[in-house]
Amino acid sequence: MNARMNRRIFGGSLLAGTGALAVRRLCSTGCLRDRRKSRSRVAILHAESYDGTLDRTLIEGLRLFDLSLRGKTVLLKPNLVEYIPGTEVNTDHRLVGAAASAFLALGAKSILVGEGPGHQRDTFLVLAESGLEKELLSRRIRFVDLNRDDIRQVPLPTSFTGLDSLWLPRTVLTSDVVVSMPKVKTHHWAGVTLSMKNLFGVVPGVAYGWPKNLLHCKGIDRSILDINAAVPAHFVIADGIIGMEGNGPLHGSPRSLGRIVLADDPVAADFVCTRLMGLNPLRVNYLAQASEFLGNGTPDRIVQLGEPLSALRSHSRSCQSLLTCALRFGTGNSENPCLTPASRSLKFRESRPTSPAAAHPGPAFRRKSHLPVESGLRMKTNVFPSIDDLRQKFQEAKYIVDEVTLSQVYVAGELKKPVLIEGPPGCGKTELAKALAFALDTVVERLQCYPGINEEKAIGKFDTALQKLCLETQADQLGTDWEYIRGRLHTMDFFVQGPIMRGLQHSPRPCVLLIDEVDKVDEEFESMLLEVLSEWQLSIPRLGTVPHKTIPFVILTSNEVRRIGDPLRRRCAYFRAEFPTVEREAEILKTRSRTGSGGLQRQIAGLWERASLRSRCTSPTNPARR
Amino acid sequence: MKGRRDGGSRRKPRSMIRSLAVLETQRLARCRLLAELRYRRLPRPGGWSHSGAQFGTEPTSLALLALHSSSSDSTVTRKDLEPLLAGQRPNGLWPAVGDGAADVNVWASAIAVNTLMVLGAAPETIIAPLDRLIHTRPLEASWLVRLRFRLSDRQVRFDPARYGWSWVPDTVSWVVPTSMALIALERAKRQGLIRGSELQKRLCLGVEMLLDRACPGGGWNAGNAVVYGVPLRPHIDPTAIALAALRFHHSLPIVRDSLTWILNRIDCPSAYSLAWVILSGAAYKDLRPDVSPALDMARDRLAALVDDPGAIQDTSTIALAALALEPEASNNPLEVRA
């Protein structure tokens, strides 16, 4: 009897427990009020740089939405995390300034900019270092530190975290329009950090600490959902002009996307931005869940303004096929050198939907797709917008390029691989680097190799004269602590940078690093190049390891005087350059000469062909081709 | 020779005049900061807010220290401490902001009890919060959580067995609250207010935790030194506060490196961070010869940064700057005398 009673009690308790869990689950997700609009609007604007035209671009973009701003207080919430020179961590100050001016121009009563960084307690230090302080002062816009604002307790409409309420800043709660202004970035824990994740910054540090650890303990995805349900952003302006890929949100690599995304729905904005990054939004947990009740993720409920997303998607597909082509050249592993071994092993494997059904899978599929959110994400975006664009740029640079070279350069750009070009002198190897710099709108850093070249010439060296001068003139400030003096004198301030160092430190845009006639260097120098070309960093005695600011597009040329070692060859996308055919030579002459006579150009090309053929016949056998 | 001596004697008064001018600039800046503090005091029962109208424990503590740091206001009565004591919860700790419902906060509690000790409050008002502070534990104190960190949650490199204090209950320990709790408990120990093995254990664990969370090249950030194998950068104010907490461990290489790192950051453009650097550095001025000249330069810079106190949003920054601009500050909250 007793045993039966115990079993009944146990069974009853189990049932009650399961029921309670089910009710709790239902309360947190099942009974959610559907907040989705019937239609969300998203606009993708072209913006190649943060130059003076941003104000106009944003005003025109905002006009597409027909917003009612008259007499309203607008709070702009940029993403300020920490200032790390050479990285694209924060929403660019020029975009924030331009947004403030655009909202004022469209009738807003007042503009506030507010942020509460999660790790850095000194908000005004980030503000000053990021350049936003000056920007806001020049535009007379007030900044509010949301970490230290007055706070109020707000009941949560959802309960993903299990919390009943959140403390939120008064400024956020009293603003008429909240605009989330994220940086388009990958995030090692959340997958991507866009307009929804950006709202972590409205949670006050004064109540939750630095970092906002309670929310991390409750789960980042769940916290994002609860925060966005409590503080819905009314509008989104996402900074995708230069985004970040890799080990975000702090240590990824800058990636030029050339886009600003505007939206009146944060979920729709984040779906579009994630696709723009070449990732599947349904693989990001909080986005998949948010699209069920908070905002729209399905294309049929997103009205696309500005540039259509379909164009970008078809372009991404062409990248995929090119990545597959790259396998043939032994460069198929799209390894990101800026990632650590641990995060590299957790590479995001994208499954791009091919049909509407696949794009919006049912619950069974979605359960499978709820993988742990990986770090080491790579945006499948491009150095060049498209291969056609690259062809066009080469034409503008008056560089006649064949299809093989074109696709090799394009693929190398996608994979961030150096290009090794071997061929006889005068066949256009160096010119390719110059044309590429033109195409990328950047500069060429040239390292001219010669027998006996050493690391000092290539990387740089400490300026001993400057160090001595500093010791003589700054003795009072340096004090007597030898360790301190030694540390002070061995900084980049006293380092004269060589071409390789300049190439790695070039910012904000990467440069083209031309390592010319690499066949003339010895094997030791070649080994030194391996570290640069695989890790994109330099180890310098007394200075330590210097990481890259941007990864340059590296072109190595060889005249085949000596065979380049296999380790270096294997790290590069390789191709041979030959003298152009008579037809190609005539085409080059046509683009470069002023005369319109095709016959004359062909005759000169033929003459040149014969002359160069004769010189090649008389030259000794090429050792590199033995 | 005579001419050279004359030249030397001419230079000396010039440098003295300059020093006096600098000191006068700093004194004036400090006066303006104190005036601003008095202006920002909240109506009854008093206290200060960070930037609005809501009582904040940190700004109130720092403002009380700043206002009672000058010789004229050195006598502190219970009435003076009333704003701070009014914010105290029945369990002895303080919330970060006073609104009745906010959770208690270790950082706020540590800074409040530290303030009460510096200002010489009656021991009966101090013992309960100190005792509560000793017995407040972060999540890692549970073996289950430690096991989780050892087995699965391993992206951040740290030893969960070495724990300190969290910001709020039900979270893990972080550098800033741990440092301030260590400073408060160390001061209490040296004033003979508390003793016992539990205190000693928490002090040792707290120091070990700080050493474990230090960034590889020196300095501290919130508490994540290496994430996914990538070393993160130190931040100025956590480094300053952690250094103050490790004052009695100054011979350790990581402490020396961190001090060197922070003394190289006196060109930072923020008054908040710079003030913490000065207050922390003051605790080391007798230990290293390069500290005092660096702090003089830092004060000079700070005086320029706080030229217009009305434009400074956070009251804590004003109070910190006022404390930092007094060269012989008696109420330095970060300095625990041996």
Image (cartoon, helix red, strand yellow):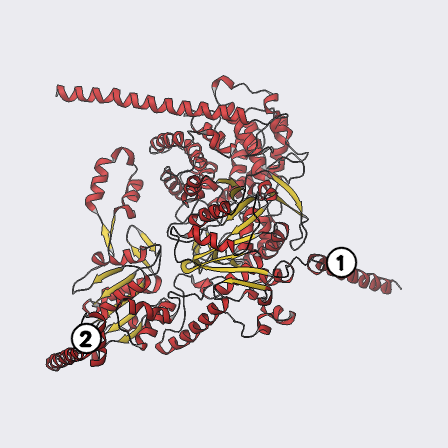
- Pointer 2: residues within 10 angstroms few (<14), some, or many (20+)? some
Q: Is B100 left or right of A376, judged from the image as shown? A: right
Identified by mark 1, the residue type is: Ala
- Pointer 1: residues within 10 angstroms few (<14), some, or many (20+)? few
- Residue A398 lies, with reference to residue A47, above or below; the image says below
The residue nearer to you, when weighing A37 against A166, is A37
Image coords of residue B299 (percent x, y): 38, 30
- Residue A74 lies, with reference to residue B84, above or below; the image says below
Point out which mark residue A20 bears.
Answer: 1
Give whichever of discs 2 and 1 has the lower sequence position: 1
Image coords of residue A592 (percent x, y): 21, 70
The residue nearer to you, when weighing B111 against A282, is A282
Image coords of residue A376 (percent x, y): 46, 62
SS at mark 1?
helix
Q: Chain of mark 2?
A: A
Residue under pointer 2: A424
Mark closer to the observer (2, 1): 2
Quarter location, residue A339: bottom left
For the question of whether residue B156 can be seen, the reply is: no
Identified by mark 2, the residue type is: Pro
Numbered marks: total? 2
SS at mark 2?
loop
